[in-house]
Image: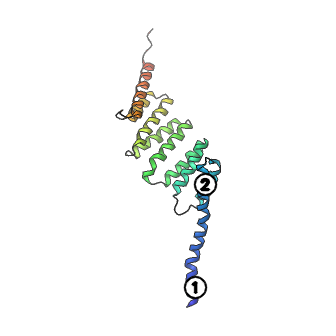
Amino acid sequence: MRTKLLVSFLIVFVPYGLLHAAAAPAVKEYKKANKLFAASNYQEAIPLYQKVLAAPPDDVAVSAIYTKIADSYYQLGHYKNALSAYRGALREQKRSERPQTQYWIGFCCFLLGRDAEAVAEFLKIPELYPGSGMWVGTAYYWAGRASERMGKKELAAEYYRKAGGNGKSTQGRFAVKRAEAVKKTSTKLQAPNPK
């Protein structure tokens, strides 16, 4: 009877102890990576975050680790790697966390000069997360900037107007003025040249 009790104890508690012991280094690595990140040592933080991602601590969301990796790459100017990591975070996030990450996906595309992709990514925010507050207006603004860079002035003006909303905030007034300026240049380009 004692032998069976001892074997049962070992079967139940030894694996738990091993799992707990294995999680301890991940917690230390994550804390160390966070300290490096806070000290702007992004290059050193990334491999630690990647190591932790393989076996994350129980109390840390996988999406949070992906976001730290993405933010680190972004700070280093490695936008392609940041884009990939933000997409990883988005897959793992709760719906309420997604608008901000979706914005950074669009912004990385914008910084990489992938304007059509940036517009598509920015427009996912008002489409998928219409109640996400400032992220909607910000997404429309940057969709306007990317459209303007592609020479699509009419579309850019439309996105700027949407970003401007009621035009009562400082950002709203700026976006409305931008829409008017783009519309004027678009009209000038379309007007026939009298000779």
Q: Nearer the viewer, mark 1 or mark 2?
A: 2
Q: State the residue in front, 9 or 108.
A: 9
**Which disc, if any, is residue 6?**
1
| Residue 27 x/y as whole percent | 58, 61
Q: Residues within 10 Å of mark 2 (few under 14, many from 20)?
A: many
Q: Which residue type does callout 1 highlight?
A: Leu
Image quarter for residue 171?
top left
On residue 60, the disc is none
Q: Check the image and report above or below for 139 versus 195.
A: below
Residue where numbered disc 2 is placed: 33
Q: Could you say where residue 130 lies in the image, as x and y percent from the top left?
A: 38, 44
What's the residue at 43%, 37% (across, down)? 140
Residue depicted at 44% across the width and 43% down the height: 124
Local packing at callout 1 (Cα closer than 10 Å; few below 14, some 14-19, many 20+) is few
Location of residue 121 with respect to 190 vertically, above or below: below
Q: Position of residue 18 (x, y in %)?
A: 60, 72
